[in-house]
Amino acid sequence: MAIANPLDTLLAQPLCALGVFLPAGVHEPDVQHRQLDHLARAGADLFEIGLPCNNPVLDGRLIRSAYQRALVEGNVLDRTVRAVAHAASLRPTVVMTYWEPVRHHGPEPLARLLADAGAAGVMVVDLPRAEAHRWRHAAHDAGLSTPHLIPRTAADTDLALMVEDASGWLYAPASSGLTGYRGRLDLAGLAAFTKRLRAASSLPVVSGVGISSPALAARVAPLVDAVIIGTPIVRALLSDPAPAAAVAATFAQALQTSIGAARDA
């Protein structure tokens, strides 16, 4: 009998899950492990661990700063693997990365290393089309899912190709800006976009980028299977790690409140 994938099981539930993004290597491994413990207890349903790189083109100032801090600390891959292993012992865990570190470490060795650490999947947000075939096979052979980030600007004619090789989830950015965006969200546009994605694929849809407050998370929750928060957590971790769990708890409570409101409607 096949063993159910915990990530698939989580995202198949009718409730919107809370995902928490953490860049690996910003703090010493024992500190990061305690942070993950606190975040799990505060309500994180899944973790997204960021593998630091030199040019994170989709990220805003704060996450860029966190990645740079991790790179200066050194031992980035080792710290990432240790963060993934601890996160995966607590909650389903996906690695978020750019192609540059995948190319540097080698798709096949990196996929095996992250899978052995317990990752459920790896999302390469800027995967070059010319490398997609090699990466897909490396991930598949390692037993990893390959979530895809789908741009809000994707035309209907391109969606079929964009979702074809995805597994695990489809990532629908709530904003077309960089991570850390704190402006108004076009929720009607996001609703229409997630509807298009669900018509193109049966995979769960998750959203992040620009979900900067618990109130916004509550409004996005009915549209998707998981809300991923990053910058609000990273901001707390960089200034003082202690409040990060409290930040996560406010988002978790907002999702629970939105679920209760939907049931009462």
Image (cartoon, rainbow, N blue to C red):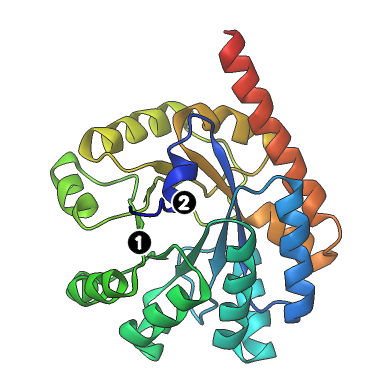
SS at mark 2?
helix
Whether residue 215 is visible, yes or no, is: no
Kindly indicate whether the residue at mark 1 contacts the one at mark 2 (C-beta within 8 angstroms): yes
Q: Residue at x 64, y 44 (%)?
A: 212
- The amino acid at mark 2 is Leu
Picture quadrant where residue 127 is located? bottom left
- The residue identified by callout 1 is 145
Q: Residue at x 68, y 40 (%)?
A: 213
Where's the C terminus, which quadrant?
A: top right
Residue 258: x and y in percent read 62, 24
Q: Residue at x 41, y 47 (%)?
A: 8
Left or right, residue 141 beside residue 234: left
Residue 7, numbered label: 2
Of residue 186 and residue 13, the one placed in the foreground of this image is: 13
Left or right, residue 90 beside residue 109: right
Residue 183: x and y in percent read 59, 41
SS at mark 1?
loop
Residue density around tag 1, few if under 14, some if 14–19, many if 20 or more, within 10 Å: many
Picture quadrant where residue 30 is located? bottom right
Q: Is residue 86 above or below residue 54?
A: above
Left or right, residue 252 beside residue 225: right
Residue 228, numbered label: none
Whether residue 135 is visible, yes or no, is: yes
* First reached walking from the N terminus: tag 2 or tag 1: 2
Q: Residue at x 58, y 87 (%)?
A: 78
- The amino acid at mark 1 is Ser
Residue density around tag 2, few if under 14, some if 14–19, many if 20 or more, within 10 Å: many
Instruction: Give the CA distance from mark 2 to mark 1.
Output: 10 Å
